[in-house]
């Protein structure tokens, strides 16, 4: 084969001059080669190609660019490329077949380690046999088809500017849809201009406290995510624990001479993880406190969409939009893999939060934002939440029923809402139970890990935080059965 | 109409018990209402609905939940909901029509401002008449259909675990595709385990320096983005300017007693913004410096895919994967709206960068990551880059030709690659030219703004940094024409 022969893959009949888009369609992969200075161009190119194949940079099956394209890239004659390809075909490194172009030969696998950085063992966690961890929805229930359809519709109708640098607050389409949705479903009062899109609650904390838009000390519920406490500590913010009971945080402890806190972080819809909703008097009281002190309430509405037995609990934000930062995300309702959340801000904080976010960094994909806007306004979000609410309620019922039968001594709390329940254990038993659960292949967390190290008062009680959402539908029954086996031995 | 009548919208025939998924499909929107304690349930519900419509929380056209669904949510009888709806229909707030359910009436528009946070004027920037800013690709050329198809395929074939919490390094599918692509097209040597996905170059800087994985002082090219210098200064990192000429940064100034820098930030493929590629001897020298000093090269390969006249310039990383952090993104090749980039790390830095990223925060959408993996491995990425390279080359040619004719005194630099060129101006004229350009509706940046405030030596020269990618295809010619008009008056 020589350069004058027909090229495999059929790019010989070039397009008319100027029809670049058409020709680009057929030009194949982009290839980086460095030709050494010595010897003929053909020898140098053949050597560079051989080296790329041998080292594994060009894996078997890779389609090489047509002669013309590579020749143009390298500034060599078309025949030089054709000859070099032919040389490597002859040597067995490449194969050339009419209609499929020139490819790296299947047997041209590189010797282990040759010319490469040593491969590391990639940690592939197969996951626990029984997943009862809190914090995630059922990943197998992600509405793939509906989401992909919303994404396609959103991309099809978006203005061109959506693909350029964007408003650091996030796409206006999403902020508009959120303002409507949050008003309707969560009682939030706001306008699109006061919503800032972020990647989740932790990002919101980083923007507010890591970037010093707000200052500590910050009162936090005595139970909560250690991850959030650590993030705040890393940002130099002192956290002051606030006692929690079955009616949520005891916000009366905030005032007047109490903690010195300038703000308070709450989970009013469903105290995390103990489960009580903040009772109405306390909701009013914490807003009064914020008004009186010029303080701020940060409302983490992490699972507000999921309520089962009791009447809906709206957002505290609705009571006073100027003294509450409301934060939500799709992490529980759709998927934590989307990294998409929102902050609803008092007007006076918008500018600082946007500056903290960074004018040049949107952080969250504008395309996913457009898809979520479409998903919300088409009603798909409501449908999905409602479907999942029914599924999780059934799981909650199964858990409560099974425990009542198999471990009747166990008190189950916080199960009126959310994606998890707290199973109280006899004093001093948490560690044993956790280790028995682990031995049984159950991934579940102990209540103690959620307790603020500075919490005063009683020992806090032993318990398990049982997430009933993360397991796939078909695996959940066996997980509850395994948990019951472990707990039946406790009583 | 009373509660015993047929419900508009036809959800009267309820599904069989247990068929939750089916019924959820038909349950409509999620509605948050708080019923006051006084009066009958019906009165309270009617009042809450009236209030929600009047305040604008329920906009005209919104479809209300079926009786049964809202009754279950609120814990009231089905007839109570039916009666309350009927009351509001009678009052004109709602409309009920067979087949389309109960909706908020079109005329029920809320009075301006009633019960709402005052609406702020949303700043809507119409954009400049002629966009010649550097930094962005042509947003109108985003490959919507191909990307949406890749997204759909990726979602359809992803394992369920992809929708749960993920590996903080990013999806393995993407890291695998990147390792292959970067080896093939940029000469990068790595394995998937050493790639960490991030949201772009600024995020990489934050992870490396903001989170103190690496320490300053950091040598930087005397020309670069002020935004990056400010980000580093904000993280407490001192930057030391390194002189730049037509062959890139003068890295000899680094050693041995020079700057005291522990690392150096370079744009070797195309010095930003002056445009020289780092010459081979300097590439070797900077790697030698890093080895000798235990220092690190941070390689910003911001537009490495776009080269026109000269032979490809591979990544410096390929010379020594243990002393170079290579950073790239889709911001120039696809869209800055995706917020998707990657760091290729020396093995010893992987653990610290992952810790800095935060185990619980993926930052970038896993679904977009899966889509990019599919886009890369299907060859769509290569095709798009090649098509855009041809388009930008044509634009570059148009710019160079027009300037040669209309402003022959102007020296055009750095145009062999990338998405921008530097037009040198007579000394002292930059400010005038920028203001004339602004008056003509041209958005373009001056060279001086990119100069490090601590740069020593000459005044650095006046100039314009002309981005030829950001304008839409149909708008580009007029933008060049406008620029020529302004420059023709300079000579």
Image (spheres, coloured by chain):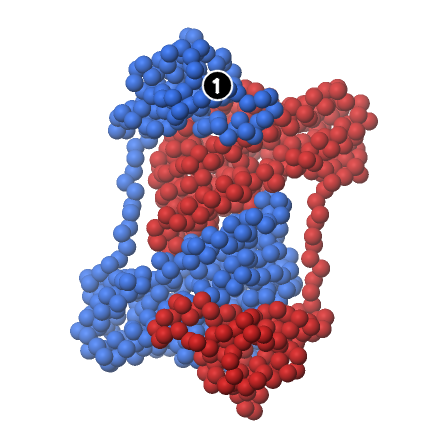
Chain colours: A red, B blue
Q: Residue A327 at what x, y percent from top left?
A: 47, 36
Location of residue A135 with respect to B257 vertically, above or below:
above
| Residue B194, horizontal then vertical, whole percent | 62, 62
Toward the right, the furthest residue is A489
Q: Nearer the viewer, residue B308 or A179?
A: B308
Q: Is residue A267 above or below residue A341?
A: above
Q: Is residue B335 left or right of residue A450?
A: left
Q: Residues within 10 Å of mark 1 (few under 14, many from 20)?
A: few
Residue under circle 1? Answer: B12
The one of A224 and A32 positioned closer to us in this rendering: A32
| Quadrant housing the N terminus of chain A | bottom right
Q: Residue at x 37, y 49 (%)?
A: A158
Query: Which residue in the rendered view is the most extreme toward the top?
Result: B39
Residue lying at 76% horizontally and 39% vertically, measured from the top left: A441
Q: Chain of mark 1?
A: B
Instruction: Please tell me which residue lies in front, A125 or A295.
Output: A125
Please identify the residue farthest to the left as the structure is shown: B489
> Helix, strand or loop at disc 1?
loop
């Amino acid at each position: 084969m020589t350069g004058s022969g027909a090229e495999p893959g059929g790019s010989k009949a070039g397009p008319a001059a100027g029809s670049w888009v058409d020709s680009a369609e057929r030009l194949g992969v982009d290839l980086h080669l460095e030709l050494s200075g010595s010897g003929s161009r053909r020898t140098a190119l053949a050597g560079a190609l051989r080296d790329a194949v041998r080292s594994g940079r060009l894996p078997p099956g890779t389609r090489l660019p047509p002669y013309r394209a590579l020749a143009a890239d390298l500034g060599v004659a078309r025949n030089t490329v054709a000859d070099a390809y032919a040389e490597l075909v002859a040597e067995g490194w490449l194969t050339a077949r009419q209609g499929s172009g020139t490819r790296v030969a299947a047997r041209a696998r590189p010797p282990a380690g040759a010319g490469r950085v040593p491969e590391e063992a990639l940690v592939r966690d197969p996951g626990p046999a029984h997943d009862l961890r809190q914090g995630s929805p059922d990943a197998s229930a992600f509405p793939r088809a509906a989401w992909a359809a919303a994404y396609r519709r959103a991309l099809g109708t978006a203005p061109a500017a959506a693909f350029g640098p964007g408003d650091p607050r996030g796409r206006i389409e999403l902020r508009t849809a959120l303002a409507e949705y949050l008003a309707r479903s969560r009682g939030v009062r706001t306008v699109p201009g006061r919503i800032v899109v972020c990647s989740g609650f932790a990002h919101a904390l980083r923007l507010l406290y890591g970037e010093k838009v707000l200052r500590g000390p910050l009162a936090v519920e005595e139970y909560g995510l250690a991850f959030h406490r650590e993030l705040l500590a890393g940002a130099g913010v002192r956290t002051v624990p606030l006692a929690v009971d079955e009616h949520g945080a005891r916000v009366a402890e905030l005032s007047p001479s109490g903690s010195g806190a300038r703000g308070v972080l709450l989970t009013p819809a469903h105290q995390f993880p103990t489960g009580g909703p903040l009772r109405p008097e306390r909701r009013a009281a914490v807003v009064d406190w914020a008004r009186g002190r010029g303080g701020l309430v940060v409302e983490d509405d992490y699972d507000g969409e999921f309520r089962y037995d009791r009447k809906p609990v709206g957002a505290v934000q609705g009571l006073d939009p100027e003294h509450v930062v409301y934060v939500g995300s799709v992490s529980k309702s759709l998927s934590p893999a989307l990294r998409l959340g929102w902050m609803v801000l008092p007007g006076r904080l918008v500018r600082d939060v946007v500056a903290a976010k960074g004018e040049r960094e949107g952080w969250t994909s504008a395309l996913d934002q457009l898809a979520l806007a479409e998903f919300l306004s088409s009603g798909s979000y409501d449908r999905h939440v409602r479907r999942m609410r029914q599924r999780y309620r059934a799981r909650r019922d199964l858990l409560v029923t099974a425990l009542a039968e198999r471990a009747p001594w166990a008190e189950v709390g916080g199960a009126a809402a959310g994606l998890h329940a707290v199973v109280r254990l006899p004093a001093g038993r948490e560690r044993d139970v956790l280790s028995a659960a682990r031995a049984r292949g159950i991934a579940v967390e102990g209540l103690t890990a959620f307790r603020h190290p500075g919490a005063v008062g009683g020992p806090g009680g032993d318990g398990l935080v049982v997430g009933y959402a993360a397991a796939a539908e078909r695996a959940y029954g066996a997980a509850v059965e395994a948990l019951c086996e472990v707990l039946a031995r406790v009583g």
